[in-house]
C-alpha cells in the first residue's frame, strides 16, 4: 500500500523452462495507473518480496547454475522506499533500486 494507492508486483512462467518474468505497476486508490507498468526482470531461481518494519519493499533473488541446478549467487535490493510516505519522496531511490535490479539480472545471465 502507498499513501495514495498501491504497488502491484506480478510474476509468471515464461516460455523458457523454470524461468519467471516479473512486472511492477503503481496505481492510485481509484485503480488508475500512477506510472506505466514496467518489467523488472526475467529470472531463473527463487524470488521473494517482503516489507521491512519501516515500510520499505525489498526483493531478494538468486541465480541458478542451469548445468546442475545449484544456486551460485544471491542478491538483495530495496525495490521501493517507505510505502507510507507522500508519493514522490522516494521516487529516485525506487528508480535506482529498479535499475540496480535490472543491471544485476542482466549481468547474472
Image (tube, rainbow, N blue to C red):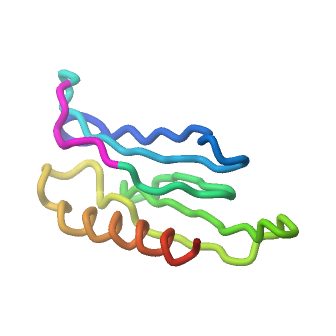
Q: Residue furthest front?
A: 15
Q: Residue at x 50, y 60 (%)?
A: 59
Q: Along the line of sight, which residue is nearer the eye, 45 or 97?
A: 45
Region of the chain picked out in magenta, as a range: 32-38
**Residue 90 located left or right of residue 71:** left
Q: Residue at x 66, y 57 (%)?
A: 44
Quarter of the picture holding the N terminus: top left
Is 35 contained in the magenta span?
Answer: yes
Q: Where residue 72 sits in the image (x, y, percent)?
A: 74, 77
Is 24 contained in the magenta span?
Answer: no
Kindly report the secondary structure that dominates the magenta region of the rendered protein.
strand
Q: Quadrant of residue 68?
A: bottom right
Q: Where residue 104 sits in the image (x, y, percent)?
A: 48, 74
Q: Residue at x 53, y 41 (%)?
A: 11
Q: Where residue 19 sits in the image (x, y, percent)?
A: 65, 50
Q: Residue at x 83, y 64 (%)?
A: 69
Q: Where residue 102 sits in the image (x, y, percent)?
A: 41, 66
Q: Along the line of sight, which residue is nearer the eye, 29 or 17?
A: 17
Q: Residue furthest right?
A: 68
Quarter of the picture holding the C terminus: bottom right
Task: Please say if 47 is above or below 95.
Answer: above
Image mark count: 0
Task: Please say if 104 is above or below 14.
Answer: below
**Residue 46 located left or right of residue 99:** right
Amino acid at each position: 500500500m502507498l499513501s495514495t494507492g498501491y504497488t502491484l508486483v506480478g510474476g509468471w512462467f515464461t516460455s523458457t523452462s523454470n524461468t519467471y518474468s516479473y512486472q511492477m505497476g503503481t496505481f492510485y486508490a481509484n485503480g488508475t495507473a500512477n506510472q506505466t507498468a514496467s518489467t523488472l526482470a526475467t529470472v531463473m531461481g527463487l524470488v521473494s518480496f517482503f516489507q521491512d518494519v519501516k515500510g520499505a519493499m525489498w526483493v531478494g533473488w538468486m541465480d541458478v547454475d542451469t548445468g546442475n541446478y545449484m544456486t551460485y549467487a544471491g542478491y538483495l535490493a530495496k525495490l521501493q522506499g517507505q510505502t507510507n510516505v507522500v508519493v514522490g519522496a522516494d521516487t529516485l531511490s525506487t528508480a535506482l533500486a529498479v535499475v540496480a535490479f535490472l543491471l544485476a539480472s542482466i549481468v547474472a545471465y
